[in-house]
Amino acid sequence: MSRRTPKAAVKRMAEFVMAKTAPLLWRTRDRSLVVLMYHRVLPPGDSRLELEQPGMYVHPSTLRLHLVALKRHFQPVQLDHWIQAARDNAPLPERAFAITFDDGWSDNFEHAYPVLAAENVPATIFVVSDMVGTGRLFWPERLGTLLRQGLARHAAQLYSLSEFAWLRALDAQIPSSVEELNPERLDRIINNAKLDDDATLCARVDDMASSLGDSECPQEVELLDWEQIRKMVRGGLISIGSHTRRHMRLSDALTIEQLHDEITGSKHVIESNAGCEVRLFCYPNGDATAAARMLVAENYLAACSTMPGWHSVRGDRYMIRRIAVHQDITGDETSFLARLSGWI
Ligand SMILES: [Zn+2]
């Protein structure tokens, strides 16, 4: 028996209609490229999912389902090859798709790469050059870990510590125990925190860590190392792109020297360690100032944004649109095809 709310039932019906009709409409769109944006690929029950934001992952079986469905309607291409061909007015497939992964998670090697290889689908992984192989984490994941540790030790008293007090302003229902800390609440806290710049947030998370002592240690290394990257590059199916040096959002808070360092510095680090040419860039959080875009254009073939939709042959190749896919909204073929249509 269905337990769906009326709103969910209407949404499901809309998805069903779109999934049936959208592929017919796609046939009229020639020389278009669908670029998919993934982050993590983790199986159900994996401990790394406990505090991960819902928008950050799919299960390996879902990735396989997506690739099989995509291949029925589109031709798989390597993103830089399609962009290069479009730039050179070379022949293009009628409808193509390209796969991208942001951040360079080690689960991409562990769980996505075998699926991509089995389906023979190429992909681009955008890595954060100075985080590769370090065992460090991005501030949102560190924040989740520290919040859990702090709540386990201090419960609601945690926020009376000056290093944690700023979190109170981010959520009216700030969790007062480990049990109350779930991915949805953490998602809200992280999204509200993004009003501040990355340097401020990293400093606050560092302060939180030192106030709790040395206890912050991720159970597993969560980001790719250079050996894994080189192995995938040698396989020929995976391209590596740059996602900056430190995952800094490219905002007005950064000086021109910092922009240079993040944009061109990362390219050099990746090329010398991965042994491949880096032709694509990806803006962290999709943020890009005019100065950042100009520097990217001087140093890369193209760049991915987080703007939704399909990339057309006449589109700005330094602001490639992508369709974000994650487990909670694309867990079956109907919802995935509806998502691809770009209407929901
Ligand atoms: Zn990112």
Image: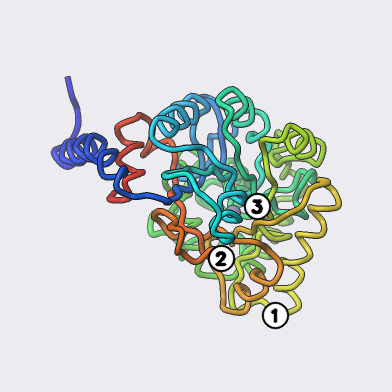
Q: Let me know if residue 175 appears in the view.
A: no
Residue at image x 34%, y 50%? Answer: 29
Residue at image x 82%, y 36%? Answer: 227
Nearest the viewer among 207 and 94 is 94
Nearer the observer: mark 2 or 3; the answer is 2
Q: Mark 1: which amino acid?
A: Thr
Give how far apart the Cα atoms at labels 3 and 1 are.
21 Å
Horizontal and vertical percent position of residue 184: 42, 45
Residue under pointer 3: 138
Q: Is residue 136 left or right of residue 335?
A: right
Q: Mark 2: which amino acid?
A: Tyr
Nearest the viewer among 77 and 90 is 90
Residue 203 lies, with reference to residue 72, above or below; the image says below
Q: Is residue 46 left or right of residue 12?
A: right
Residue at image x 65%, y 61%? Answer: 301
Q: Let me know if residue 48 appears in the view.
A: yes
Residue under pointer 2: 318
Residue under pointer 1: 255
- Ligand 1 contact, mark 3 (Cβ < 8 Å): yes
- Lower position in the chain sequence, tag 2 or tag 3: 3
Nearer the observer: mark 2 or 1; the answer is 2
